[in-house]
Amino acid sequence: MYVIAGLGNPGKKYENTRHNMGFIAIDQLAEKHNIKVDKLKFKALVGEGRIAGQKVLLVKPQTYMNLSGESIREVMNFYKLEPENLIVIYDDIDIEAGTLRIRKFGSAGTHNGMKSVVYQLQSDRFPRIRLGIGSQKKGDLVNFVIGGFSKEEVPVLEEAVQHAVLAAECIIEDGIDKAMNQYNTKKRSKKDDE
């Protein structure tokens, strides 16, 4: 069994914001696999289904971003799962908008939601899919991450979310190495466009 958790903030106010990329990816995964993520359990909205023949639990913590780990710890403890059976999808301001970074494990970086997950699980040994929302702005980061998308960002981020969905499916079906090889995106150089 796999737990796929998307990080975000509950409520209409945050619905279509950069910090809710994890929720947006879970919604697309749910729609694609006909899974209803509507049960309130483990301080989260959850839905059970199957992806690539495997039982999965889709999870959207309702604790607000900075406490995401509380919800995910409850899920993992309840099902007695190893960290390797968790996939976390979240936004990352430190990578370019639209870029996907998949890792087997690693630190939480600057992301408070991930810091909470790592702290609560007492482990960083779980796969994660980071969706770049990179900020060129030097202003207020909080307002940037909880802000809506610009017109230019929408197609770029929509494509990134589609790739995150495919990457999550690939991790379950073919393993993390294949997912990293197939879906990690490099920054395009001008040479690529020539």
Image: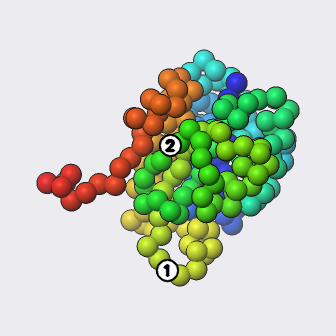
Of helix, strand and loop, which one carries label 2? strand
Q: Quadrant of residue 74?
A: top right
The image shows a total of numbered marks equal to 2
Other residues around mark 1 within 10 Å, as few (<14) / some (14–19) / many (≥20): few
Please name the amino acid that badge 2 sits on. Ile
C-alpha gap between disc 1 and disc 2: 26 Å
Please name the amino acid that badge 1 sits on. Lys
Residue on which the image places disc 1: 138
Question: Which residue occupies 56% across, 38% down?
Answer: 104
Q: Earlier in the sequence, mark 1 or mark 2?
A: 2
Residue 95 or residue 159, whichever sits in front = 95
User: Where does residue 48 sit, x and y in percent of width and height?
Assistant: 73, 29
Q: Is residue 154 left or right of residue 144?
A: left
Q: Is residue 21 left or right of residue 11?
A: left
Residue on which the image places disc 2: 102
User: Where does residue 119 sit, x and y in percent of width and height?
Assistant: 76, 52
